[in-house]
Amino acid sequence: MIGADARQRLFFALWPPIEAAESMARIARTPGMAGTPVARDKLHVTLAFHGACDMAGRDALIARAERVRMPSMALAFDRLGGVAKARLRWLELSHPPPGLLELAAFLRGPGLDRHRFVPHITLCRKAETEAACALAPIAWRATEFVLAESGAHGVAGEYRTIARWPLGGAGGPGSNME
Ligand code: 2AM
Protein backbone atom coordinates (compact mmCIF):
# COMPACT_ATOMS: atom_id res chain seq x y z
CA MET A 1 0.00 0.00 0.00
CA ILE A 2 1.36 3.44 -0.83
CA GLY A 3 0.13 6.84 0.33
CA ALA A 4 -1.79 9.07 -2.08
CA ASP A 5 1.26 11.33 -2.55
CA ALA A 6 3.93 8.63 -2.65
CA ARG A 7 5.44 7.83 -6.02
CA GLN A 8 6.76 4.57 -7.36
CA ARG A 9 8.86 4.02 -10.50
CA LEU A 10 6.74 1.54 -12.41
CA PHE A 11 7.32 -0.59 -15.48
CA PHE A 12 5.69 -3.50 -17.28
CA ALA A 13 7.96 -6.44 -18.00
CA LEU A 14 8.35 -10.08 -18.89
CA TRP A 15 10.46 -12.22 -16.55
CA PRO A 16 12.08 -15.30 -18.10
CA PRO A 17 11.66 -18.70 -16.45
CA ILE A 18 14.58 -19.82 -14.31
CA GLU A 19 16.15 -22.20 -16.89
CA ALA A 20 16.29 -19.46 -19.53
CA ALA A 21 17.51 -16.92 -16.97
CA GLU A 22 20.32 -19.29 -15.96
CA SER A 23 21.46 -19.62 -19.58
CA MET A 24 21.41 -15.84 -19.91
CA ALA A 25 23.29 -15.32 -16.66
CA ARG A 26 25.98 -17.73 -17.89
CA ILE A 27 26.47 -15.60 -21.00
CA ALA A 28 26.60 -12.47 -18.85
CA ARG A 29 29.43 -14.01 -16.81
CA THR A 30 31.60 -15.15 -19.73
CA PRO A 31 35.04 -13.54 -19.47
CA GLY A 32 34.78 -11.73 -22.83
CA MET A 33 31.73 -9.75 -21.72
CA ALA A 34 33.45 -7.32 -19.29
CA GLY A 35 31.24 -4.99 -17.25
CA THR A 36 28.85 -5.70 -14.40
CA PRO A 37 26.59 -8.71 -15.01
CA VAL A 38 22.92 -8.36 -14.08
CA ALA A 39 21.96 -10.94 -11.43
CA ARG A 40 19.98 -13.91 -12.71
CA ASP A 41 16.75 -13.03 -10.91
CA LYS A 42 16.84 -9.46 -12.24
CA LEU A 43 17.01 -10.37 -15.93
CA HIS A 44 13.84 -9.17 -17.68
CA VAL A 45 12.36 -7.62 -20.81
CA THR A 46 11.07 -4.11 -20.13
CA LEU A 47 7.86 -3.64 -22.11
CA ALA A 48 6.99 -0.14 -20.94
CA PHE A 49 8.87 2.04 -18.45
CA HIS A 50 6.41 4.56 -17.00
CA GLY A 51 8.70 6.13 -14.40
CA ALA A 52 7.44 7.85 -11.25
CA CYS A 53 3.71 7.25 -10.77
CA ASP A 54 1.38 8.27 -7.96
CA MET A 55 -1.41 6.00 -6.78
CA ALA A 56 -3.85 7.20 -9.46
CA GLY A 57 -1.20 6.60 -12.11
CA ARG A 58 -0.56 3.12 -10.80
CA ASP A 59 -4.29 2.35 -10.81
CA ALA A 60 -4.53 3.56 -14.42
CA LEU A 61 -1.69 1.21 -15.41
CA ILE A 62 -3.42 -1.69 -13.65
CA ALA A 63 -6.68 -0.87 -15.44
CA ARG A 64 -4.83 -0.85 -18.77
CA ALA A 65 -3.21 -4.21 -18.05
CA GLU A 66 -6.59 -5.71 -17.14
CA ARG A 67 -7.70 -5.12 -20.74
CA VAL A 68 -4.96 -7.28 -22.28
CA ARG A 69 -6.27 -10.41 -24.03
CA MET A 70 -3.37 -12.05 -25.80
CA PRO A 71 -2.04 -15.55 -26.29
CA SER A 72 1.26 -16.66 -24.79
CA MET A 73 4.22 -16.03 -27.07
CA ALA A 74 7.34 -17.92 -28.07
CA LEU A 75 10.49 -15.82 -27.77
CA ALA A 76 13.94 -16.70 -29.06
CA PHE A 77 16.77 -14.43 -27.94
CA ASP A 78 19.41 -15.14 -30.54
CA ARG A 79 21.60 -12.04 -30.76
CA LEU A 80 24.02 -10.21 -28.54
CA GLY A 81 23.66 -6.47 -29.00
CA GLY A 82 23.66 -3.31 -26.93
CA VAL A 83 24.22 0.41 -26.89
CA ALA A 84 27.88 1.42 -26.78
CA LYS A 85 27.17 4.96 -25.56
CA ALA A 86 25.15 3.68 -22.59
CA ARG A 87 27.66 0.82 -22.05
CA LEU A 88 24.85 -1.73 -22.13
CA ARG A 89 25.23 -5.26 -23.42
CA TRP A 90 22.01 -7.09 -24.05
CA LEU A 91 20.25 -10.02 -25.67
CA GLU A 92 17.83 -9.28 -28.48
CA LEU A 93 15.64 -11.15 -30.96
CA SER A 94 16.23 -11.33 -34.70
CA HIS A 95 12.50 -11.91 -35.10
CA PRO A 96 10.41 -10.32 -32.34
CA PRO A 97 6.90 -11.80 -32.62
CA PRO A 98 4.32 -9.19 -33.69
CA GLY A 99 2.39 -9.94 -30.48
CA LEU A 100 5.32 -8.78 -28.37
CA LEU A 101 5.47 -5.44 -30.17
CA GLU A 102 1.70 -5.10 -29.95
CA LEU A 103 1.68 -5.86 -26.22
CA ALA A 104 4.47 -3.36 -25.56
CA ALA A 105 2.74 -0.67 -27.65
CA PHE A 106 -0.52 -1.19 -25.76
CA LEU A 107 1.16 -1.10 -22.33
CA ARG A 108 3.20 1.95 -23.28
CA GLY A 109 0.13 3.88 -24.41
CA PRO A 110 0.25 7.15 -26.35
CA GLY A 111 2.53 8.86 -23.79
CA LEU A 112 5.53 6.59 -24.44
CA ASP A 113 4.84 5.72 -28.04
CA ARG A 114 7.31 8.23 -29.44
CA HIS A 115 10.25 6.18 -28.07
CA ARG A 116 11.29 3.32 -30.32
CA PHE A 117 10.88 -0.04 -28.62
CA VAL A 118 13.72 -2.53 -29.03
CA PRO A 119 12.87 -5.64 -27.01
CA HIS A 120 15.96 -6.75 -25.10
CA ILE A 121 17.27 -8.25 -21.89
CA THR A 122 20.13 -6.28 -20.38
CA LEU A 123 22.93 -8.69 -19.45
CA CYS A 124 25.75 -6.34 -18.46
CA ARG A 125 26.05 -2.71 -17.48
CA LYS A 126 29.26 -0.65 -17.71
CA ALA A 127 30.13 -3.01 -20.55
CA GLU A 128 32.76 -2.62 -23.23
CA THR A 129 30.23 -3.02 -26.01
CA GLU A 130 31.29 -4.75 -29.20
CA ALA A 131 29.47 -5.36 -32.45
CA ALA A 132 26.29 -7.43 -32.41
CA CYS A 133 26.68 -11.15 -33.04
CA ALA A 134 24.48 -14.22 -33.41
CA LEU A 135 24.06 -16.67 -30.53
CA ALA A 136 22.51 -20.09 -30.06
CA PRO A 137 18.89 -19.06 -29.34
CA ILE A 138 17.68 -19.00 -25.75
CA ALA A 139 13.99 -19.77 -26.26
CA TRP A 140 11.11 -19.55 -23.81
CA ARG A 141 7.39 -19.02 -23.85
CA ALA A 142 6.07 -15.90 -22.12
CA THR A 143 2.90 -16.90 -20.30
CA GLU A 144 2.46 -13.76 -18.19
CA PHE A 145 3.54 -10.15 -17.85
CA VAL A 146 4.02 -8.13 -14.69
CA LEU A 147 3.84 -4.61 -13.33
CA ALA A 148 6.99 -4.04 -11.28
CA GLU A 149 8.52 -1.30 -9.18
CA SER A 150 12.08 -0.20 -9.91
CA GLY A 151 14.09 1.05 -6.92
CA ALA A 152 11.96 -0.97 -4.53
CA HIS A 153 12.60 -0.38 -0.81
CA GLY A 154 14.59 2.72 -1.81
CA VAL A 155 17.37 0.59 -3.33
CA ALA A 156 18.42 1.38 -6.92
CA GLY A 157 18.25 -1.71 -9.10
CA GLU A 158 15.90 -3.58 -6.75
CA TYR A 159 12.66 -4.74 -8.36
CA ARG A 160 9.38 -5.73 -6.76
CA THR A 161 6.45 -7.32 -8.57
CA ILE A 162 3.22 -5.44 -7.90
CA ALA A 163 0.80 -7.47 -10.05
CA ARG A 164 0.86 -10.11 -12.78
CA TRP A 165 -1.45 -11.01 -15.65
CA PRO A 166 -1.59 -14.18 -17.75
CA LEU A 167 -0.96 -14.40 -21.49
CA GLY A 168 -3.02 -17.16 -22.99
CA GLY A 169 -5.95 -18.44 -20.99
CA ALA A 170 -9.18 -16.91 -22.19
CA GLY A 171 -7.49 -14.84 -24.90
CA GLY A 172 -7.37 -17.51 -27.60
CA PRO A 173 -5.42 -16.94 -30.78
CA GLY A 174 -4.86 -13.35 -31.80
CA SER A 175 -5.26 -10.34 -29.60
CA ASN A 176 -8.29 -8.42 -28.51
CA MET A 177 -7.48 -5.07 -27.00
CA GLU A 178 -9.12 -1.71 -27.60
P1 2AM B 1 16.63 -2.04 -19.37
O1 2AM B 1 15.30 -2.69 -19.63
O2 2AM B 1 17.38 -1.71 -20.61
O3 2AM B 1 17.47 -2.84 -18.43
C1 2AM B 1 13.57 -0.84 -14.69
O4 2AM B 1 14.24 0.30 -14.28
C2 2AM B 1 13.86 -1.17 -16.11
O5 2AM B 1 13.31 -0.20 -16.99
C3 2AM B 1 15.33 -1.27 -16.42
O6 2AM B 1 15.58 -2.59 -16.78
C4 2AM B 1 15.59 -0.31 -17.56
O7 2AM B 1 16.36 -0.65 -18.65
C5 2AM B 1 14.23 0.09 -18.03
N1 2AM B 1 14.17 1.51 -18.32
C6 2AM B 1 13.80 2.06 -19.50
N2 2AM B 1 13.83 3.38 -19.42
C7 2AM B 1 14.27 3.71 -18.19
C8 2AM B 1 14.54 4.95 -17.52
N3 2AM B 1 14.34 6.12 -18.10
N4 2AM B 1 15.01 4.89 -16.25
C9 2AM B 1 15.22 3.70 -15.64
N5 2AM B 1 14.96 2.52 -16.21
C10 2AM B 1 14.50 2.51 -17.48
Image: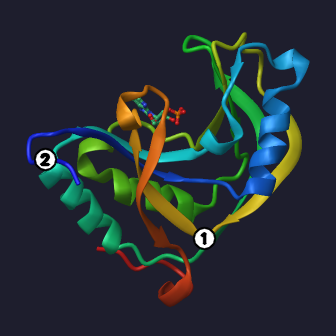
Give the answer, above or below, for where 59 lies relative to 7.
Answer: below
Q: Is residue 167 left or right of residue 76?
A: left
What is the x, y in percent for residue 74?
70, 66
Residue of label 2: 3
* Residue that sits furthest to the left in the current view: 4
Q: What residue do we see at 71% from left, 40% from top?
A: 40
The answer to whether residue 133 is seen in the rendering is no
Within 10 Å of disc 2 (Cα), the crowding (few <14, some 14-19, many 20+) is few
Q: Between residue 46 and residue 115, name the one nearer to us.
A: 46
Q: Amino acid at mark 1?
A: Thr
Q: Is residue 117 left or right of residue 178?
A: right
Q: Quadrant of residue 177?
A: bottom left
What is the x, y in percent for residue 170?
48, 89
Q: Quadrant of residue 133?
A: top right
Q: What residue do we see at 34% from left, 66% from top?
A: 65
Residue of label 1: 143
Q: For the residues carrying marks 1 and 2, which lies nearer the camera in this image?
A: 2
Quadrant location, the N terminus: bottom left
